[in-house]
């Protein structure tokens, strides 16, 4: 076993399998990776043999090309579909204590500048990104802190904003939050509710506590003694937020970024800068020797989950030719190989239908003309994938949102009709799993929150305003982890339009198989045969099979036209 492991490490440096092993760390997945490696090694051992040789035993081996590449001719695609990040919006800079100093002006008026506000965090879903790995790598993300104000009424510089760009189809969910402004509001409210007398007593008891609170909120003139924090009479100011904070999403954050966003969206506004000493000047105190500190930045712990958003999802058994089909339709350089589980991570490709001439080939009624559409290729589904065989059903979530499903069946292996039925069976199981999951989440939500979780002072007559309710930020409560992702409004899989791509039609003795498949689909369309998934309400309006030889690029031109018809 040790020798085998060493062999994997040495002979599989391209890291596709290693990445996958990290992603799917189940024994089954690991077994698949091992199998993959063994196959990879066996391919390497007779490395000069063209890939298609095994597929076409009696024919001349096809020349290597874009559609029949060597096993090493593929682009590396780093894929990560889930990650958790901690983001900190920037704290505001402190206000400045300063006074005008000029010749003949002995005691000038205060002129301390305000602190700059902290940087905010924005999010934007953009087309073209297909993975969350860049975000995952960043770990803790911090926006810049605002600079402190300076003398001569110079305001501090704003902190740097941070923009998080994520792929379209990302779901963002809040796990935990720490908001110092909300905490301060809560503290002040608590004080008010307790009554001034009690508060005074408490103040005396907790002198040290008060000192630290005051130190957190106020800046004294340079050279002041620490005891001055107790003797100085500070005005009462309530915590402040930047105006843009009103544009933050409602808490707890749950976003479904299913469209390309032209403009970034505010996720967390930075803390507002502190006020310089001129703000506190009044008739009784014309030269205040203190300024306020900037508000602290907010911490958000967010979970990101990507569900690829493609127009068409390719579903097929391993080695059916899905990736070759993707290569023939798009410029994708996804890996192709004559062994199962060549594809271990989803791939997405764009089919350009306007020939780069700026005029769309297909105009859709009442919709913006499309110049392209996207196709997602996922790892193959083996029989019994719902029992976690092969790579399981997990990757199906990436085609869950696809508008159209394309079932890729290999005409050269077994009965294509049975193959199609098996694929539908797995889809049906996946749909059932999703429904059960959904029901479970609804059940969890229906449970009322235990009363003892609420802070004790909430039980008094005055009900708290919702904005002041801050979750317990000292630790991430396990209950919060159970919160479901926002429910995605998606039609059930079986109601989506679908068609069949019958591949490897160039191989001998595939004609009869295709005829049988075509007759079966015609019968399904007419209602003479059952839906392949045995679903009464399944979509069967215009089901058809397209014979192709993806490896030669033959017959594939019909697919974009068909997709555009179905999308319209
Ligand atoms: N003769 C012939 N061979 C094909 C055709 N399409 C694919 N192949 C071959 O079939 C093998 C598997 O192709 P892939 O595209 O990697 O299959 P896949 O469905 O992506 O496989 P997994 O990624 O393992 O799920 C490769 O050796 C291809 O060269 C075709 O139309 N004709
Ligand atoms: Mg593949």
Image (cartoon, grey):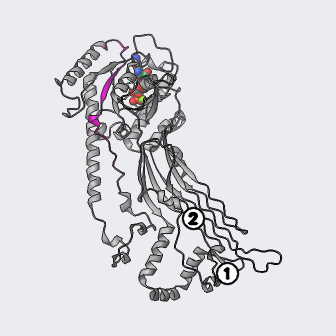
Q: Is residue 16 visible?
A: yes
Q: Quadrant of residue 100?
A: bottom right
Q: Quick one: quadrant of the C terminus? A: top left
Q: Earlier in the sequence, mark 1 or mark 2?
A: 2
Which residue is at the far right? Answer: 103
Q: Is mark 2 within 8 Å of ligand 2?
A: no
How many labels were placed on the picture? 2
Residue 286 — which label?
1
Which residue is located at x 49 percent, y 65 percent? Answer: 179
Q: Is mark 1 within 8 Å of ligand 2?
A: no
Which residue is at the far front? Answer: 283
Which residue is located at x 67 percent, y 66 percent? Answer: 149
Left or right position of 164 against 490? right
Q: Which residue is mark 2?
A: 272
Badge nearest the viewer, 1 or 2 = 1
Please say whether residue 368 is one of the residues in the magenta stretch.
no
Q: Is residue 470 visible?
A: no
Give the SS element for disc 2.
loop
**Location of ligand 1 given as a quarter of the image:** top left
Q: Position of residue 366 (x, y in %)?
A: 36, 31
**Highlighted magenta segment, given as a residue range:** 487-510
Which residue is located at x 44 percent, y 56 percent? Answer: 249
Give the SS element for disc 1.
loop
Which residue is located at x 52 percent, y 88 percent? Answer: 204
Q: Quadrant of residue 345?
A: top left
Mark 1: few, some, or many residues within 10 Å (few <14, many ≥20)?
Answer: some
């Amino acid at each position: 076993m040790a020798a085998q492991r060493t062999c994997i490490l040495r002979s599989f440096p391209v890291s596709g399998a290693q990445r996958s092993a990290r992603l799917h760390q189940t024994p089954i997945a690991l077994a698949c990776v091992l199998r993959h490696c063994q196959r990879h090694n066996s391919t390497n051992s007779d490395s000069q043999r063209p890939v298609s040789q095994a597929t076409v035993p009696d024919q001349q081996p096809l020349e290597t090309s874009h559609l029949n590449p060597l096993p090493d001719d593929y682009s590396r695609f780093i894929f990560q579909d889930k990650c958790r990040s901690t983001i900190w919006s920037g704290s505001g800079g402190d206000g400045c204590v300063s006074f005008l100093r000029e010749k003949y002006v002995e005691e000038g008026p205060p002129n301390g500048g305000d602190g700059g506000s902290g940087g905010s965090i924005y999010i934007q879903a953009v087309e073209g990104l297909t993975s969350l790995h860049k975000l995952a790598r960043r770990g803790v993300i911090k926006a810049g802190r605002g600079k402190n104000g300076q003398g001569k009424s110079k305001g501090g510089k704003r902190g740097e904003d941070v923009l998080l760009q994520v792929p379209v189809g990302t779901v963002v969910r809040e796990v935990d939050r720490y908001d110092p402004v909300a905490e301060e509001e809560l503290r002040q409210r608590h004080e008010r509710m307790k009554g001034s007398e009690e508060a005074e007593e408490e103040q005396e008891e907790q002198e040290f506590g008060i000192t630290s609170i005051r130190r957190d909120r106020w800046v004294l003139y340079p050279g002041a003694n620490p005891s001055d924090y107790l003797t100085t009479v500070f005005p009462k100011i309530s915590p402040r937020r930047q105006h843009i904070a009103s544009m933050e999403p409602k808490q707890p954050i749950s976003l479904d970024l299913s469209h390309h966003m032209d403009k970034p969206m505010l996720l967390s506004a930075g803390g507002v800068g502190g006020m310089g000493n001129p703000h506190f000047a009044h008739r009784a105190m014309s030269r205040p020797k203190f300024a306020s500190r900037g508000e602290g930045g907010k911490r958000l712990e967010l979970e990101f989950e990507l569900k690829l958003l493609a127009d068409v999802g390719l579903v097929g058994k391993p080695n059916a030719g899905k990736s070759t089909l993707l290569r023939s339709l798009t410029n994708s350089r996804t890996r192709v190989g004559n062994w199962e589980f060549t594809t271990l991570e989803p791939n997405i490709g764009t089919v350009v239908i306007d020939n780069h001439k700026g005029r769309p080939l297909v105009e859709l009624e009442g919709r913006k003309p499309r110049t392209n559409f996207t196709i997602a290729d996922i790892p193959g589904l083996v029989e019994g994938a719902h029992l976690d065989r092969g790579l399981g059903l997990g990757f199906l979530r990436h085609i869950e949102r696809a508008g159209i499903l394309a079932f890729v069946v290999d005409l050269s292996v077994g009965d294509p009709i049975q193959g199609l039925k098996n694929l539908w069976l797995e889809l049906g199981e996946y749909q059932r799993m999703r429904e059960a999951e959904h029901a479970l989440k609804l059940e969890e939500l229906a449970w009322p929150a235990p009363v003892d979780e609420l802070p004790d002072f909430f039980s008094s007559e005055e009900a708290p305003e919702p904005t002041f309710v801050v979750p317990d930020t000292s630790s991430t409560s396990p209950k919060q982890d159970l919160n479901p992702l926002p429910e995605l409004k998606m039609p059930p899989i079986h109601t989506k339009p679908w068609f069949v791509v019958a591949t490897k039609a160039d191989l001998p003795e595939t004609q009869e198989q295709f005829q049988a498949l075509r007759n079966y689909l015609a019968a399904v369309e007419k209602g003479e045969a059952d839906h392949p998934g045995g679903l009464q309400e399944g979509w069967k309006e215009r089901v058809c099979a397209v014979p192709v030889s993806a490896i030669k690029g033959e017959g594939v031109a019909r697919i974009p036209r068909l997709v555009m018809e179905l999308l319209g």
